[in-house]
């Protein structure tokens, strides 16, 4: 008989009859438990932190990519505040200049501030700190720490403005930095030689050359 003409056979695998008694022709093998598909747990919704009126409630954690603001820095002014402050400053400056010129007839109009004047102002402060304005015969008073800070200030200004200066401004900056650095080296070397000359030889009291005019003295 071909496979297509075979009759269908239905096997009754029930172990009990309708009244609940065991069937004599039931299959004695135990029933197999069908596997139960377990659905994966649903993902939990992300935690939301809501502001609480309780002052003792813990604050939500701050992500590492967004560090908290520095409490020591004041909040940055807005554009409107900057504009108002600039306008008030300009008005006050004009009133001050008008009052000064009224009290001093014939006074020249002060020149407008420029980059060259800023550099020259720091340069003159450095020369004063290095004792370069002492008159002949007077003992120069040197502020080495202040001079070093002024020189470093010029170096920072040169670095921040590099590539944004005119050729004349760049030449002025290079010349000023070279002069103040060389002046700082000359003064420190002169102080070192002066300190070595003041040391008396063994058995001799006093320091030759101490207090002589023209020798620099350290202020701090």
Image (spheres, rainbow, N blue to C red):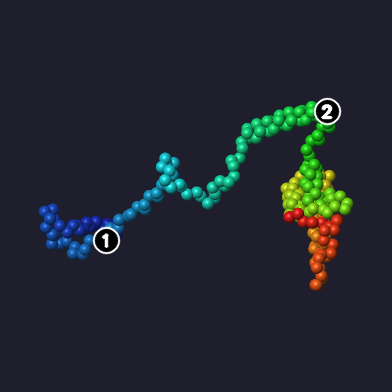
In this picture, residue 84 sits left or right of residue 60: right
Choose top left, top right, bottom left or bottom right for residue 16: bottom left
Pick whichever, 17 or 5, lies toward us. Answer: 17
Viewer-nearest of discs 2 and 1: 2
Q: Is 142 situated above or below 97?
A: below
Mark 2 and mark 1 lie on one chain; the one further toward the N terminus is 1
Q: Please tell me which residue is depicted at 44% across the width and 41% down the height of the picture.
A: 51
Q: Provide the residue designation for mark 1.
A: 1
Q: Is 121 situated above or below 140?
A: above
Quadrant location, the C terminus: bottom right
Quadrant location, the N terminus: bottom left
* Residue at mark 2 to residue at mark 1: CA–CA distance: 136 Å
Count of numbered circles on the image:
2
Q: Please tell me which residue is depicted at 73% across the width and 32% down the height of the picture.
A: 93
Choose top left, top right, bottom left or bottom right for residue 85: top right
Pick whichever, 23 or 100, lies toward us. Answer: 100
Q: Is residue 206 visible in the rendered structure shown here? A: yes
Q: Please tell me which residue is depicted at 32% across the width and 55% down the height of the picture.
A: 37
Give percent across and percent down for residue 35.
Answer: 30, 58
Q: Which mark is residue 105?
A: 2
Give percent across and percent down for residue 185.
Answer: 81, 58
Pick whichever, 94 or 138, lies toward us. Answer: 138
Give percent across and percent down for residue 3.
Answer: 29, 59
Pick whichever, 121 or 106, lies toward us. Answer: 106
Q: Is residue 163 visible in the rendered structure shown here? A: no
Q: Helix, strand, or loop for circle 1?
A: loop
Crowding near pointer 1: few (<14 within 10 Å), some, many (20+)?
few
Choose top left, top right, bottom left or bottom right for residue 99: top right
């Amino acid at each position: 008989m071909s496979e297509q003409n075979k009759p269908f056979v239905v096997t009754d695998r029930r172990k009990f009859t309708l009244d609940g008694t065991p069937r004599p022709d039931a299959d004695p093998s135990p029933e197999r438990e069908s596997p139960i598909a377990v659905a994966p747990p649903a993902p939990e919704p992300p935690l939301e932190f809501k502001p609480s009126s309780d002052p003792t409630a813990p604050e939500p954690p701050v992500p590492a990519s967004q560090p908290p603001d520095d409490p020591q820095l004041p909040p940055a002014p807005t554009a409107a505040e900057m504009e108002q402050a600039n306008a008030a400053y300009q008005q006050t400056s004009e009133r001050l200049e008008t009052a000064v010129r009224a009290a001093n007839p014939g006074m020249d109009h002060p020149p407008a501030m420029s980059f060259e004047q800023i550099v020259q102002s720091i340069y003159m402060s450095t020369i004063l700190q290095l004792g370069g304005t002492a008159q002949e015969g007077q003992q120069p008073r040197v502020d080495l720490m202040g001079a070093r800070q002024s020189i470093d200030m010029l170096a920072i200004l040169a670095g921040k403005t590099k590539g944004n200066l005119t050729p004349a401004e760049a030449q002025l900056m290079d010349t000023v930095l070279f002069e103040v650095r060389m002046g700082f080296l000359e003064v420190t070397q002169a102080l070192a030689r002066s300190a070595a000359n003041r040391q008396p030889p063994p058995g001799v009291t006093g320091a030759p050359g101490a207090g002589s005019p023209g020798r620099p003295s350290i202020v701090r």
